[in-house]
Amino acid sequence: PISSHTRLETPTNLRHVITGRGERKMANQSRGQGGHLIFKMNALEDPGMIKLLYRASQAGVRIDLLVRGLCCLRPGIPGVSENIRVISILGRFLEHSRIFHFANGGKEETYLGSADWMPRNLFERCEVVFPVKDKAARTRIQDEILAEYLADTAKARLMPEDGS
């Protein structure tokens, strides 16, 4: 098994570990433990990762995606992605932060790094995503940074199911 403190790298293990975390969320959901995924990235294009998110949504997992640019996933489709919300926030500056947050019923996991979910980033480049081990830092990322993005009403745009 891969430790929750494993550094994730492409092309070696990033997809595998993220898929495992998604599968765990689906299992937790089926046991009534709920869960919430919050992922912030610049692009979501990889078909395998999109299928994983659709499966998680179908299992009842709540998913918030903060995708600045290209997003090939369609949120809000009944029976497919009704538990997924996609928000795009465009500002004056290009943001390079990627945040992958897994709410696990009190055992939160947060990763930071450089990898967007695009085939080129997952299979053709060397990208690193690392766990945030410090509980205070994880709490700050979740409660201050991600919460601010999710609550934005000034520059945020919500993607409807038609992808516009």
Image: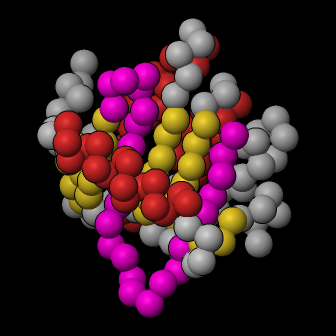
- Confirm whether residue 78 shows in the render: yes
Residue 53 lies, in percent from the top left, at: 58, 41
Residue 155 lies, in percent from the top left, at: 58, 78
- Up-down relation of residue 32 to residue 71 (above or below): above
Q: Nearer the viewer, residue 116 or 131?
A: 131
Q: Residue furthest bottom?
A: 92
Colour basis: secondary structure
Q: Nearer the viewer, residue 150 or 86?
A: 150
In the rendered structure, the answer to whether residue 48 lies left or right of residue 39 reads: right
Q: Which residues are magenta?
A: 83-108
- Confirm whether residue 124 shows in the render: no
| Residue drawn where x is 20% and y is 37% of the image | 135
| Residue drawn where x is 73% and y is 43% of the image | 81
- Up-down relation of residue 83 to residue 61 (above or below): below
Q: Nearer the viewer, residue 160 or 135?
A: 135
Residue 64 lies, in percent from the top left, at: 56, 49
- Up-down relation of residue 74 to residue 48 (above or below): below
Quarter of the C terminus within the rendering: bottom right
Asked where in the image residue 158 lies, by quadrant, the reply is bottom right
Q: Is residue 107 magenta?
A: yes
| Residue drawn where x is 21% and y is 47% of the image | 137
Residue 115 lies, in percent from the top left, at: 33, 60
| Residue drawn where x is 39% and y is 87% of the image | 93
- Up-down relation of residue 23 to residue 135 (above or below): above
Question: How many tags in the picture?
Answer: 0
